[in-house]
């Protein structure tokens, strides 16, 4: 078992390398416009849980996750050659709805501010 600090550093490195690979090396069109939002590595270094999102939102969720499943062994080999570990963790990919939720909250707040401005405008007209 490794320390929490070391797993955090490994997760950060996996995120950086994988993000770079998605931009420059992965040619699968299903993985275009995808962002790595988080990576979590367990303390035994058995699994790396990778959370992904896309600009389009969950419309392409299934397509994107299928693309990652198809590229999983390639990505793991490439990451293992870049990050020196005795045994490289298995990759697991998950959809991260957080950016969509944040966007929805932003829109709700903006609509509340717009309503507030409308109420102030009608009150000053009277």
Image (cartoon, rainbow, N blue to C red):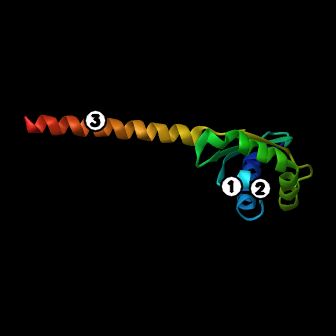
Q: Residues within 10 Å of mark 1 (few under 14, many from 20)?
A: some
Q: Tell me the quadrant of the picture where the C terminus can be found.
A: top left
Mark 1–mark 2 CB contact (< 8 Å): yes
Q: Position of residue 74 (x, y in %)?
A: 87, 54
Write the residue at 91% across / 49% down.
87
Write the residue at 49% across / 42% down.
103
Q: Quick check: can you spot residue 40? A: no
Structural distance between the alpha carbons of marks 3 and 2:
44 Å
Mark 3–mark 1 CB contact (< 8 Å): no
Q: Quick check: can you spot residue 96? A: yes
Q: Please state which of the two labelled residues, at mark 3 or mark 2, is closer to the viewer.
A: 2
- Residue 32 has which mark? 1
Q: Residue furthest right?
A: 86
- Residue indicated by mark 2: 28
Q: Residues within 10 Å of mark 2 (few under 14, many from 20)?
A: few
Q: Tell me the quadrant of the picture where the N terminus can be found.
A: top right
Structural distance between the alpha carbons of marks 1 and 2:
7 Å
- Residue 10 has which mark? none
Q: Earlier in the sequence, mark 3 or mark 1?
A: 1
- The quarter of the picture where residue 82 lies is bottom right
80 is higher (above) or lower (below) than 3: below
Q: Position of residue 25 (x, y in %)?
A: 77, 63
10 to the left or right of 1: left
Q: Earlier in the sequence, mark 3 or mark 2?
A: 2
Label 1's element? loop
- Residue 115 has which mark? 3
Label 2's element? loop
State the residue in front, 42 or 111: 111
């Amino acid at each position: 078992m490794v320390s929490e600090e070391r797993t955090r550093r490994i997760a950060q490195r996996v995120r950086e390398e994988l993000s770079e690979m998605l931009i420059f090396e992965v040619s699968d069109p299903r993985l275009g416009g995808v962002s790595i939002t988080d990576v979590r590595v367990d303390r035994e270094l058995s699994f790396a849980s990778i959370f992904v999102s896309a600009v389009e939102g969950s419309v392409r969720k299934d397509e994107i996750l299928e693309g990652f499943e198809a590229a999983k062994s390639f990505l793991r080999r490439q990451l293992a050659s870049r990050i020196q570990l005795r045994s490289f963790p298995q990759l697991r990919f998950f959809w991260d709805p957080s950016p969509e939720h944040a966007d929805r909250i932003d829109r709700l707040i903006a609509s509340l501010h717009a309503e507030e401005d409308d109420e102030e405008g009608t009150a000053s007209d009277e």
